[in-house]
Amino acid sequence: MSKYWNNRTKKTIPYIPGEQPKDRKIIKLNTNENPYPPSPKVIKAIQKAANDRLRLYPDPECIEFRKAVAARYGVKIEQVFAGNGSDEILGFAFGGFFESGTQARPILFPDITYSFYPVYANLWDIPYRTIPLREDFSIDCEDYKAPCGGVVFPNPNAPTGMSVPLAGILELAKYLEEQEKILIVDEAYIAFGSANQSAVSHIEKFPNLLTVHTLSKSESLAGLRTGFAIGNEVLIEGLCRIRDSFNSYTLDRLAIAGASAALADTRYYNEINNRVINTKERVAQVLRGLDFQVLPSSANFLFIKPPTGNGKEFFAALREKGILVRYFSKDRTADFLRVSIGTDEDMDKFLKSCKEILGTQ
Ligand code: PMP
């Protein structure tokens, strides 16, 4: 606390990102990064962009990148917003679309979900109400059909990894449209489940539907900080108004070049992401055999409850063995661990450590 902080800074409780350990020997399964490198075409594009033109500001409209997104998803460039990671886009969307102040209706999001949502809501002074996940940890869109200031959730949800059926999302979008409220679907992990259904192709029908995407996971570019949103032209214009009230150049020249190349190389990314999915299924099966509870995951991580029933202790025991996973101490998640899917080799070491901790090896 400092006397120089204003009241907003004093009452802010910031998001705490997963640890980025300096020790490279640690097997890092804690922040859902892709274990495989980005496409070689991405590296080439970035190297090519590292030239004397860096003295010039980048394109504030990110036309090259938005064109690549529009081509990939079959939407208009005016329906695409580019941002410095999807966190930034979510921050802008909260500020641009949800009402603040005590008179405003609360926005709704799940009680167990991405822990940045309450942080943005608090920062912008937006009232919110959390909706409990169902007993099986699923999101039921019916639970969100209530008078509110708008709705946001990820599909698949994090940290559970469970997907939300598209039919329910579209019905909710319709309900909210009648109330003139926004539905934000955060599709950070949509590429990691063959049955996952993106809401992108429905943005024409629902002017209140915004899908948010990141290149950090499926494009292996967490270090480049790029994301995008797809929605009605008017929503995109709203996001631009907020962005241009902070910083007009949120994507630098290298990011624009690399991200554009990534979106064009679907063949490479399909291959590595399929590898992640296959590894996930294999690991889930072994864990179930070891009596872990494993939630059905449509993402690049598993949410698991060790048979010992104590998530915190198991987290510490894995850490001792040089394996870093993510632990969330809150209520219903306290018995669980979230484990990002690494390479087959990493996951074999993880499984071996689990067996050692359980004393079955
Ligand atoms: N949404 C969800 C559900 C996430 O888990 C993450 C990653 N922490 C993000 C958004 C943000 O990703 P990024 O800012 O790297 O694009």
Image (cartoon, rainbow, N blue to C red):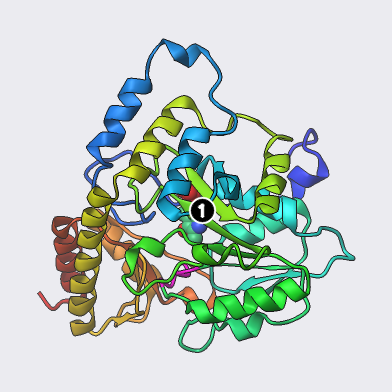
Image coordinates of residue 105 in percent, x first then y, are 82, 70
Q: Nearer the viewer, residue 350 or 67?
A: 67
Q: Is residue 143 above or below residue 186?
A: below
Q: Residues within 10 Å of mark 1 (few under 14, many from 20)?
A: many
Magenta segment, principal secondary structure? loop
Q: Nearer the viewer, residue 256 or 11?
A: 256
Residue 160 in magenta stretch:
yes
Quarter of the image that includes the N terminus: top right
Residue drawn at the location 25% of the way across and 43% of the way down: 37
Residue 148 in magenta stretch:
no
Q: List the single residue furthest toward the bottom.
A: 135
- The answer to which quarter of the image holds residue 175 is bottom right
Q: Is residue 182 above or below residue 256?
A: below
- Does residue 14 appear in this view? no
Q: Is residue 245 above or below residue 210?
A: above
Q: Secondary structure at mark 1?
A: loop
Quarter of the image that includes the C terminus: bottom left
Q: List the single residue furthest toward the left.
A: 361
Q: Please report the bounds of the magenta region as a residue range.
A: 155-161
Residue drawn at the location 61% of the way across and 80% of the way down: 171
- Does residue 188 appear in this view? yes
- The answer to which quarter of the image holds residue 2 is top right
Image coordinates of residue 43 in percent, x first then y, are 28, 31
Q: Nearer the viewer, residue 84 or 310?
A: 84
**Which residue is under mark 1?**
75
